[in-house]
Amino acid sequence: MAIDTIDRRSGARRGLDVLRDPLLNKGTAFSEKERVAYGLRGLLPAHVLSQAEQSQRFLANLRKLSDPLDKFVALNSLHDRNESLFFRILCDHIDEMQPIVYTPVVGLACQKFGQIFQRPRGMFIGINDRGSIANVLRNWPHPAGIIVVTDGERILGLGDLGANGMGIPVGKLSLYTACAGIHPKLCLPITLDVGTNNDALRDDLNYVGLRQRRATGAEYDDFIEEFMLATQEVFPGALVQFEDFANHNAFRLLEKYRDRICSFNDDIQGTAAVALAGLFSALRITGAPLIEQKILFLGAGEAATGIADLIVSAMVANGLTREQALRQNWPVDSQGLVVKSRTNLADHKLTYAHEHPPASDFLAAIKMLNPTAIIGVSAVGGTFTQAVLEEMARINARPIVFALSNPTSQSECTAEQAYRWSGGRALFACGSPFDPVSLSGKTFVPRQGNNSYIFPGIGLGVLACGAKTITDDMFMSAAHALAQLVTESDLEQGSLYPALPRIREVSAAIAATVADNAYRRGSAIRPKPADTLRDVQSQMYDPHY
Ligand code: NAD
């Protein structure tokens, strides 16, 4: 950071004030000149380190830690001390850091949130703040551009963690900055604390949230309505990303707000785009057309519905009627195959409840339907059994197997199991990270179908052009853009996604696609630049000093 930059950003602030502001602090990397200018002489040891040296030192200490939660805490503390260094390390070592700041370790961090809590980050807005939410939001010191909000009711595959779910918006926004260069000042994590129905948590001494059962019905809806309107009053045009809401709220909140406020639900729409991109990559290997795919989902929640909806749109774009496309997608939930004859199906399952005899379990459904692809989004570990994988390999030359559930313990199968039980023929993607697998002389490199390939680029694109709404079309073009960046050598080693270190290139490409889409539809506030990609790239924050 040049001295004039820090001068502008720090205003009149000096001394410890500068050292204690994570957006300004460079610690031992302040130069002699800066130490004089900002009243830091005597407050720091004499030797001046470069950012690269600070990074090396931090990494050496981090790698000595064996417990993943300790690593999370160490990174979190750095985030609280020195944001530039934190993001420099995230950007340079995204493969190693993403699993710590986000899934799977963030799940553990949410479960232990009260125990490891040191400093607040983001905003906690409680049901008791009704009537004054806009005023509460005004306490935030920066002009938020992207808000990630959860009510903590369905954190990853871990259930209701109440206000402890805050780890998720914080982690997601770290990825917005690391993966797409959204300036940290524009990022606002929010937890809406409406209580928790998790009895153990309410009785836990360390629990940070309101000790009451969840608000529901009109009380909940009025609270969300006030919150959504307040975000736009205080931060006009800010993008609101819904995160880890339970099914019964997620689908209807998305429908209620998507055309009124620039908003999306990553669990539904971001997941859909990343899964569709993986499918596009798999089809580059098999050579089969998308419209001939029959997809069986294990799970019928937000991820399954979102993915199926986007696949249907893509199939319709490729020539099927909507009716035909719907019948290529089949969800299985805890009661078996979702079919029309079942009673009491939740609303979001009805679209995919086809006329068909029931199947009591997943293997039986595979035998009846002969799918080309299975997608696990059930949050139940070990459900892609040996029998399931062997059956998929029996009916397909190259079975498509996506085990997307998180955290790792909930993964439907491991990468090793997918390759071994399919005789090395599975086209595999995972939700949790797995190491490369060697089998019969070949090394497979499974890659995570992680939403972080998609949502940061969507956010960057929206901010860059000032999009007023986010459409399904944008997610479809994001999926195409992502799949196009998968190289032939990626495919040869079984990787259906680009290498994660290319993530900023990926995000810029997605952002340009998304922005161009908004310019075309006339729903962008800003005028179209001559070169959208360059314009987007020029807006990316670079965490070098
Ligand atoms: P969700 O709670 O909305 O849906 C889970 C679904 O699984 C529900 O329909 C439930 O009925 C069903 N289910 C539960 N037990 C089952 C069983 N024994 N057999 C079959 N179905 C069962 O959750 P979601 O948002 O859809 O997420 C599901 C999982 O996918 C989570 O683990 C989540 O972390 C993961 N996920 C991964 C990615 C990714 O890798 N990119 C993205 C989103 C979600």
Image (cartoon, grey):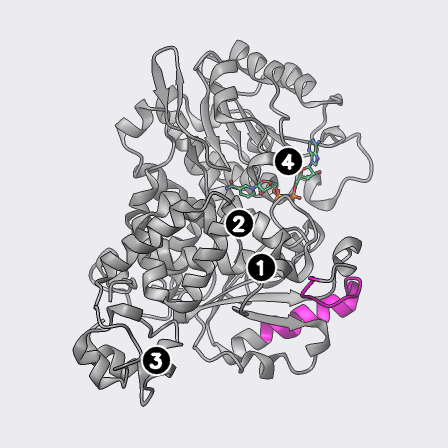
Question: How far, Cα to Cα, is label 2 from label 3?
Answer: 29 Å
Residue occupied by mark 1: 116
Q: Which numbered disc, 2 or 4, marks the residue that appears first in the sequence? A: 2
CB contact under 8 Å: marks 3 and 4: no
Which region of the structure is painted magenta? Answer: 206-229
Q: Secondary structure at mark 1?
A: helix
Q: Callout 1: 10 Å neighbours few (<14), some, many (20+)?
A: some
Q: Which numbered disc, 4 or 1, marks the residue that appears first in the sequence? A: 1
Q: Callout 4: 10 Å neighbours few (<14), some, many (20+)?
A: many
| 392 displayed left or right of 215 | left
Residue occupied by mark 4: 378
Mark 3 vs mark 4: give the one in front.
3
Q: Secondary structure at mark 2?
A: helix
CB contact under 8 Å: marks 2 and 1: yes
Q: Which numbered disc, 2 or 1, marks the residue that appears first in the sequence? A: 2
CB contact under 8 Å: marks 2 and 4: no
Position of residue 118 measured from the top left corner of the image (x, y, whole percent): 55, 66
Q: Callout 3: 10 Å neighbours few (<14), some, many (20+)?
A: many
Q: Residue 69 has which mark?
A: 2
Q: Amino acid at mark 4?
A: Ser
Viewer can see residue 40:
yes
Q: Which numbered disc, 3 or 4, marks the residue that appears first in the sequence? A: 3
Frontmost residue, 316 versus 119: 119
The answer to which quarter of the image holds residue 83 is: bottom left
Q: Amino acid at mark 1?
A: Ile
Q: Residue at coordinates 38% horizontally, 83% vertically from top-left?
A: 17
Which quarter of the figure is the C terminus placed in? bottom left
Position of residue 136 measured from the top left corner of the image (x, y, whole percent): 59, 80
